[in-house]
Image (cartoon, rainbow, N blue to C red):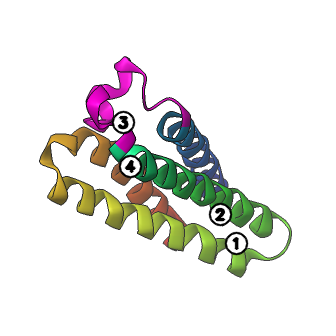
Amino acid sequence: MSTATQVLAIVIAVMLVSVFVMESFLYRNPRLYPMFLTKPRDFDAVRLWTVNIGFYNLTTAIALVVGVLLARNDHVAQGQALVVFTAAQHTFMAVVLVVSQRKLWFNALLEGVPAAVLLILALN
């Protein structure tokens, strides 16, 4: 696995940890309403969704870091498999996001473009 692939995987992992914090703990912050399309009256209804998706992003970040660590410690095939799967998953989920809620097209780009680039790098 190339150095560029590893660096991008770690950058995406950091992004995902940031999103985890926003989704799981800061989703009531008024500055995040446009990002999540939430309103104060919806907080109780969306709490389960935001917290679960937040932790999904955290575990995905962990998978990317573990993939890089495996690749750097003579388990290249296993590490690459984790990185490729995670990149493919987020590329697919970005498409699902924009199809299910067109207003979140920018979020889908932020999720999908880096993941697609990582997928291409990891497969070459």
Check disc 1 and report the residue beneath it.
79
Residue type marked 4:
Glu
Q: Tell me: 55 left or right of 23.
A: right
Q: Residues within 10 Å of mark 4 (few under 14, many from 20)?
A: many
Find the magenta span and give its range. Answer: 25-44
Circle nearer the N terminus (4, 1)? 1
Residue 35 in view (yes/no)? yes
Residue type marked 1:
Gly
**Cα separation between marks 4 and 1:** 21 Å
Judging depth in this view, the residue of 105 and 27 nearest the camera is 27
**Cα separation between marks 1 and 2:** 9 Å
Judging depth in this view, the residue of 19 and 123 nearest the camera is 19
Q: Measuring from the top left, give residue 15's x and y in whole percent.
A: 54, 40
For the view shown, which residue lies furthest in the bottom direction? Answer: 77
Disc 2 on helix, strand or loop?
helix
Q: How many marks?
A: 4
Residue 43 shows which numbered tag? 3
Q: Tell me: 124 left or right of 102.
A: right
Instruction: Look at discs 1 and 2 and give the one toward the viewer.
Output: 2
Residue 63 shows which numbered tag? 2
Residue type marked 2:
Ala
Circle nearer the N terminus (4, 2)? 2
The residue drawn where x is 54% and y is 45% is 16
The residue drawn where x is 65% and y is 63% is 63
Circle nearer the N terminus (2, 3)? 3
Residue 111 shows which numbered tag? 4
Q: Measuring from the top left, give residue 98's x and y in whole percent.
A: 20, 53
Q: Are marks 2 and 3 in contact (CB under 8 Å)?
A: no
